[in-house]
Amino acid sequence: MAGALIIDGKARAQALRAEVAAGVERLKAARGVTPGLAVVLVGEDPASQIYVRNKAAATRAAGMLSLEYKLSADAAETALLALIGELNRRGDVHGILVQLPLPAHIDARKVIEAVDPAKDADGFHPLNAGQLASGGRAVVPCTPAGCLILLKSVRADLAGARAVVLGRSNIVGKPMAQLLLNENCTVTIAHSRTRDLPGLAREADILVAATGRAQMVKGSWIKPGAIVVDVGIQRVAAGEGKTRLVGDVAFAQAVEVAGAITPVPGGVGPMTIACLLQNTLEAATAAAGGR
Ligand code: GUN
């Protein structure tokens, strides 16, 4: 019998998006301000094109202004930096997101640092990363923020839990670890050089998988009753020329062992966009003089 509670990220994200839309209406009524999010895509990466389209549609659905900028794959770094400078100055733009990855000839760090930290809808600027690490007022990266909401929907108080984060990216692994530490978890960040990954994962009351490796986490890696959050999303062959989406966790095995688990799709993915909208609303609210 499949014992795990399957965490409904789609429903939680819908609820958050509705909350954000209500907040947008309040801000418009109270201050006459419409939150604006600018999304910048460089190149034609098919996955990024889909993400950007979905982000723009969600932005409009929340009642916000959505601006989309598409630069060609060979656009100069200086052109991208000039665009960011312009967006930093615009009064109707409260959030800026540059879709990653960027083409190899562009220095992603330089681009991230060029975004005004107050408009950094992704929370990737080093000032926001530092604020998160030092317990200050940070814009929190969207994917880990969404993961934390899902975790807390199952276990409101995470204090004392052993948390293992698989993956150390700036986008997910590191900020996830900081958020869990802020929740008073005992946190371990594991990565490709970690010894005995299965053994370490089995110690976790909370296991967040963000490795980017399809179905890497087996049922035998999971402590019975653990909460498992799967950040991965990959398309794999499903026979007869068909494909299906899978995460970093071997779901069919994991669901037999875990206490609660996020599915793929319908888990973390929808939360990421909802948290992006929330970050944009918060930036617009702050720009309008706060609540
Ligand atoms: N590429 C993959 N995930 C993300 C994200 O959360 N933000 C941006 N800007 N690019 C990404």
Image (cartoon, rainbow, N blue to C red):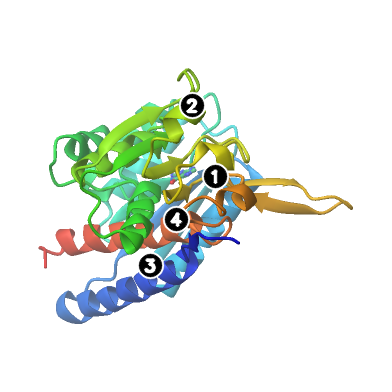
Question: Which is closer to the viewer, label 3 or label 2?
Answer: 2
- Chain-order first, disc 3 or disc 2: 3
Badge 2, how many Cα within 10 Å: few under 14, some, many 20+?
some
Question: Which is closer to the viewer, label 1 or label 3?
Answer: 1
For disc 3, the marked residue is 65
**Could you give the CA–CA distance between mark 4 and mark 2, rounded to whole angstroms?**
20 Å
Question: Image quadrant for the N terminus?
Answer: bottom right
For disc 2, the marked residue is 197
The kind of residue tagged 3 is Leu
- Chain-order first, disc 1 or disc 2: 2
Per the image, label 3 sits on a secondary structure element best described as strand
The kind of residue tagged 4 is Gly
In the picture provided, is 109 more to the left or to the right than 136? Answer: right
**Circles 4, 1 touching at the beta carbon (< 8 Å):** no
**Could you give the CA–CA distance between mark 1 and mark 2, rounded to whole angstroms?**
17 Å
Q: Position of residue 20 (x, y in %)?
A: 31, 71
Q: Quadrant of residue 67?
A: bottom left
**Circles 4, 2 touching at the beta carbon (< 8 Å):** no
**Could you give the CA–CA distance between mark 4 and mark 1, rounded to whole angstroms?**
19 Å
Per the image, label 1 sits on a secondary structure element best described as loop
- Chain-order first, disc 1 or disc 3: 3
Badge 4, how many Cα within 10 Å: few under 14, some, many 20+?
many
- Chain-order first, disc 4 or disc 3: 3
In the picture provided, is 71 more to the left or to the right than 134? Answer: right
Q: Quadrant of residue 283?
A: bottom left
Vertically, is 75 above or below 232? above
For disc 4, the marked residue is 259
**Could you give the CA–CA distance between mark 3 and mark 2, rounded to whole angstroms?**
44 Å
Instruction: Indicate which disc residue 232 carries.
Output: 1
The kind of residue tagged 2 is Leu
Badge 1, how many Cα within 10 Å: few under 14, some, many 20+?
many
The kind of residue tagged 1 is Gly
